[in-house]
Every structure is written in C-alpha cells, then in structure tokens.
Amino acid sequence: MSLRTFILGLSASFGVAWLAVIVIPYLKMRDLAPVPFPESKNTAAIFNPKRTGRVAHGAKVYAENGCYLCHTQVIRPTYAGNDLYRADWGGKKEDPVRGDTRRETNAFDFQGETFAHIGLTRMGPDLSNLGHRMEALRATGVDPEQWLLLRIYNPQLNPKLWNSTCPPHPFFFSKREIKGNPSTDALPVDVGPDRELVPNSDARALVSYLLSLKKDHAVPASLNFTPVKKDDES
Ligand code: HEC
C-alpha cells in the first residue's frame, strides 16, 4: 500500500465518521426553529416552556451534581424500548383538559436549555415529567418542595425509601442556630436543640428545576410519535 492510499484511507475512515456523527447532526440541529402548528382546541400557537432564571440555575446544579448519571430525561421512541406504558413518565394518562398527553421526547423538548440532560443511565426513574408527579403529590396534601428538599438532603430519611440509592446531598444545607423565630423554610429534621436545617440557594434552584420538569406539551402531529394520534391534539 502506498503512503498516498494509506493517508486517503485514513482520512476517509475518520472523515466519514466525523461527517456522519458530528457535521450532519450539527447542521441539522444547530438552529431548531419552533415548529408552527395549526390552531387546535387546546393550543392557539407554539408553546415553548420558559427555562430561564432559577430554573436555568437549577439545571446547572443538576449537571454539577451528576444527577444525569442515574436519571434520564428521554421517553424513548417505541422502536427503541417502550416507555409510554408508564403513565407518569411520558406525560399524564388522564389530563382533565388534554386527555392522554403521553408522548415520546423530541429535540424541541430541550429548547432553551444550555444542555440537554438526556442522561446516561437509568439507575433512578426518568425525570422528564417529574413536575406532574410532584403535582399529584401536592394533591395528596404533601408539600412537593419540602418533599424534594428532604430527599435531596437524604432520601433514606423517608421510611419508604430506607434502601434508596439516590445519593444524599447534605452540603446543600446548613445547620444553624435558631435566633429569634425559626426559619420558615427549615426542614423537619432534628439537628439538635435550638438548631435548624436550612437549604441554600442551590438546593432551592434545583427544586425549582425539578418542579418545572414537564415535557409533554402539545406538538404538531409530525412530531408526535405516540402510537395513537389524535387529530384535535396534534
Ligand atoms: C447513583 C445514582 C443516582 C444519582 C447520582 C442520583 N439519583 Fe436520584 N434516584 C436514584 C434512584 C435509584 C432513585 C429511586 C429510589 C428513590 O426514590 O430514592 C432515585 C429517585 C429520585 C427522585 C424521585 C423520582 C420519583 O419519581 O419518585 C428524585 C426527584 C431524584 N432521584 C432526584 C435526584 C437529583 C436531584 C439528583 C442529583 C442531585 C439525583 N437524583 C442523583 C439514583 C440516583
């Protein structure tokens, strides 16, 4: 083999992979414009959830602490594994207004995010629609914000989760002396007499982000890969 063929072969084998894996996807996805869709009974226009401010900060905290290592935010296309049967993963099975909102994830679900936290493994449950689960929890009389803070502090404090492998993050909280009235956002954890456990701003931002996680808004039929498509919901 001449040097020329070798160099050409080498460039071709790396070049084709580079084109297919980096250049083409980049060109396709670098500026995704919102997809307009015809007025339907539920949405009059394009809807992109806002992901700025505290939610964006929370997404950063989520990344910094490696939550994505164990939690995905992708409802897979059914050919790659069925996720839709889990009523609360892909959306709500029975939304009072929209009916069945379950659908697969698409690229637009991450619009406005600096980083799409699709996740690496599924040691823990998928969090694409955690916000809906937290709303359901609120309906049962539990304060989801406090529930999340407690589980971020130490999931195993919840007797039902005594063997949870979701790691504790005590460094988001400070134990401080109660001066005057106790803090309104202190967690119900006993940390000694006259002392309280309060979340820091990162913990609150993370909770705002987790509560905001809803990736089931209506999409045009062309993007709705749910097996049963409904015309009026497209
Ligand atoms: C080592 C893997 C691992 C990491 C890292 C991890 N988790 Fe978890 N997580 C789990 C497992 C396993 C569960 C299921 C058991 C449970 O509910 O505690 C879970 C459950 C959860 C739940 C409850 C979801 C539900 O639907 O009930 C939330 C919320 C959560 N994790 C948030 C986080 C956040 C926020 C981070 C990052 C600060 C994080 N997790 C990092 C493994 C992990």
Image (tube, rainbow, N blue to C red):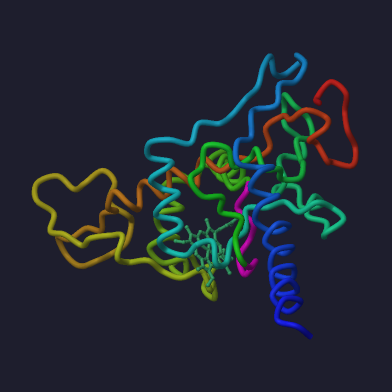
Q: Residue at x 32, y 66 (%)?
A: 170
**Left or right, residue 122 beside residue 230:** left
- The x and y percentages for residue 3 are 70, 81
Say which quadrant the C terminus sits in: top right
Judge by depth and name the residue closer to the eye, 38 or 146. Answer: 38
Q: Residue at x 54, y 61 (%)?
A: 68
Which stretch is magenta?
A: 121-128
Say which quadrant the N terminus sits in: bottom right
Q: Main secondary structure of the magenta part?
A: loop
Q: Residue at x 77, y 41 (%)?
A: 103
Is 176 magenta? The answer is no
Q: Residue furthest bottom?
A: 1
**Left or right, residue 70 beside residue 153:** right
Q: Residue furthest left?
A: 179
- The x and y percentages for residue 179 are 9, 51
- The x and y percentages for residue 224 are 80, 36
Q: How many marks?
A: 0
